[in-house]
Image: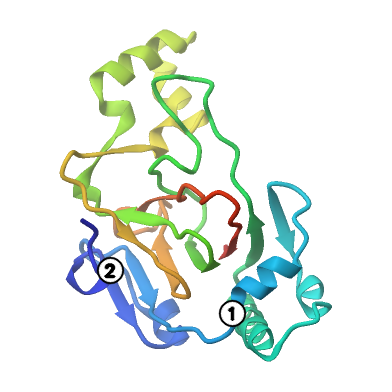
Amino acid sequence: MKNTFSDSKQVITVSTFSDLVNTNFQGNMNAICWSRNLLGDFKEIVDKLELIENITEVSVEDLLILQLSEQGHLAREIILNDIQLLTNCGASPSLNLLKNYERDDELDFISTDVYSYHVDRSPIETDTFLCTYHGSASDILPNDQVEQKILIPEIREKLKELHEGQETEFETFLEEYFFDLHYQPKSDAKPLNLGLGHLWRLAVDHPTQQVLPCVHRAPAEKDGEYRLLLIC
């Protein structure tokens, strides 16, 4: 069973972009949702874009040259406006047409790809913004419903076997290969799906952050369906 925005202490819902970017994270709240019911045909845009690789970055120019119906035009205007809003506040948004991300299957006891629950880290003060316009949407989990994978004894022992350096360098090794960013859901975990059309701001692990970073994961894509995702 999945949570809804209204019953989650992790999320606050706002009604304007200004509130999205200016509301402070606090307490257990590390995700802010600009809740929207978007008009327009985003599938038409997906169908008319060309997938070059499994992940194709779509430029503003790519969007502008599309010949679209009235509903497709509405969808394009929303995307262009979101890109402009984020750019104006200093972010660097990227619009991606996604078939799938690369899977990390090198180790059979731990995964470090984006399908694994993880947090984002940055050396500077920043947040993660994302909006799924079409396709499957990401999930988040409260921090008390996950366990850091490197603290799970059997995983930690295998990582120690993998580490070939001094014991004093082990923690640095975990950070260097991003093992410390990944989390295992507890048995009673209740994911919250971010849904379509909502613009989200998620807390990132950085030196000035006052709350725990938001634990999230990319969804498993549906066969034959591409995702259209704005992220920065």
Residue at the image point whose x is 45% and y is 70% from the top: 196
Place of residue 40 in the rendered image (x, y in percent of width and height, measured from the top left): 58, 84
> How dense is the environment of label 1, judged by Cα within 10 Å: few (below 14), some, or many (20 and up)?
some
The answer to whether 100 is drawn above or below residue 41 in the figure is above
Q: Is residue 80 left or right of residue 211?
A: right
Quadrant of the rendered image containing residue 28: bottom left
Residue type (three-letter) at the residue carrying disc 1: Asp
Residue placed under numbered mark 1 in the picture: 82
Place of residue 45 in the rendered image (x, y in percent of width and height, measured from the top left): 68, 73
Residue type (three-letter) at the residue carrying disc 2: Val
The answer to whether 128 is drawn above or below residue 55 in the figure is below
Residue placed under numbered mark 2 in the picture: 11
Which element is circle 1 on? helix
Between the residue at mark 2 and the residue at mark 1, the CA separation in whole angstroms equals: 21 Å
Q: Please state, as top left, top right, bottom left or bottom right, where the C terminus lies in the image.
A: bottom right
Q: Is residue 114 left or right of residue 13?
A: right
The answer to whether 100 is drawn above or below residue 203 in the figure is above
Q: Of residues 207 and 15, which is closer to you in this image? A: 15
Q: Please state, as top left, top right, bottom left or bottom right, where the N terminus lies in the image.
A: bottom left
Residue lying farthest front? 224
Would you say residue 214 is visible in this rendering?
no
Place of residue 5 in the rendered image (x, y in percent of width and height, measured from the top left): 26, 71
Q: Of residues 120 and 183, which is closer to you in this image? A: 183
